[in-house]
Amino acid sequence: MKLGTVLVFLKYPRPGRVKTRLAAVVGGERAAELYRGWIGLVLRRLQPLRPRVDVVGCHDGGPAELFGEWRHLADDWRAQADGDLGTRLEAAFADAFSDGRPVVAVGTDCLEADADLVAEAFAALRSQDAVFGPAADGGYYLVGAARRLPGFFDGVRWSSADTLRDHLERCRRGGWSAALLPPRHDIDTWDDWQAYLQRQRGGDDGERGD
């Protein structure tokens, strides 16, 4: 039996609709090109988990057919719900919890979240109600729950320096235990991208920048 489900939240890489802060420096076409590469990179890094978890692409920005080049890298593809991030996460988790197994979600902004980190998240959920991967900007690159937690995504200020703090407070008020993974970095701006490349120290991820 598989450990659970990992949801990968991604958008179709349409110029002007993705990575807008990065695009302010490199332009919409280049930002979309970079983001297209990141989608593949994140999904490829999760492949070692597929014998043990189901990988689901939660897509936005167009129908599933637009994501055909990555279709083989996930077990299923589901459209994101309308609404803010909390609403979309709540809907995706509710759907994935239908089989009663733990659920973990990651985005495509953090290129440092690999199969080992996600496996660590599932391991944490054997004894904890929730798990978070802290991001350097105050948000998180991963969130997971061992079971359905009513109102788990309520009262969180999304895309802010308070996101993780708010969600940990929500866990405290709900009486839910929470584990924290090692911190990692999201990529939202040109400086974030350059810092990521510097951390790679010239390693070949297939996604080198200009």
Image (cartoon, rainbow, N blue to C red):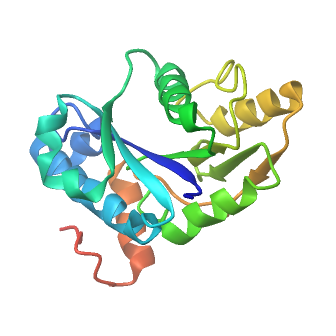
Q: Is residue 207 left or right of residue 193?
A: left
Residue depicted at x 19% and y 35% = 64
Give the percent coordinates (x, y) of residue 144.
63, 44
Residue 102 in the image: above or below residue 175: below
Q: How many marks?
A: 0
Give the percent coordinates (x, y) of residue 98.
55, 31
| The residue positioned farthest toward the top in the image shown | 83
Which quarter shows the C terminus? bottom left
Which quarter shows the N terminus? bottom right
Give the percent coordinates (x, y) of residue 133.
63, 53
Residue depicted at x 49% and y 62% = 113
Q: Is residue 160 left or right of residue 156?
A: left
Quadrant position of residue 111: bottom left
Viewer-proximal residue among 55 and 12? 55
Give the percent coordinates (x, y) of residue 6.
49, 49
Quadrant position of residue 7: top left
Residue depicted at x 27% and y 36% = 20
Residue 184 in the image: above or below residue 207: above
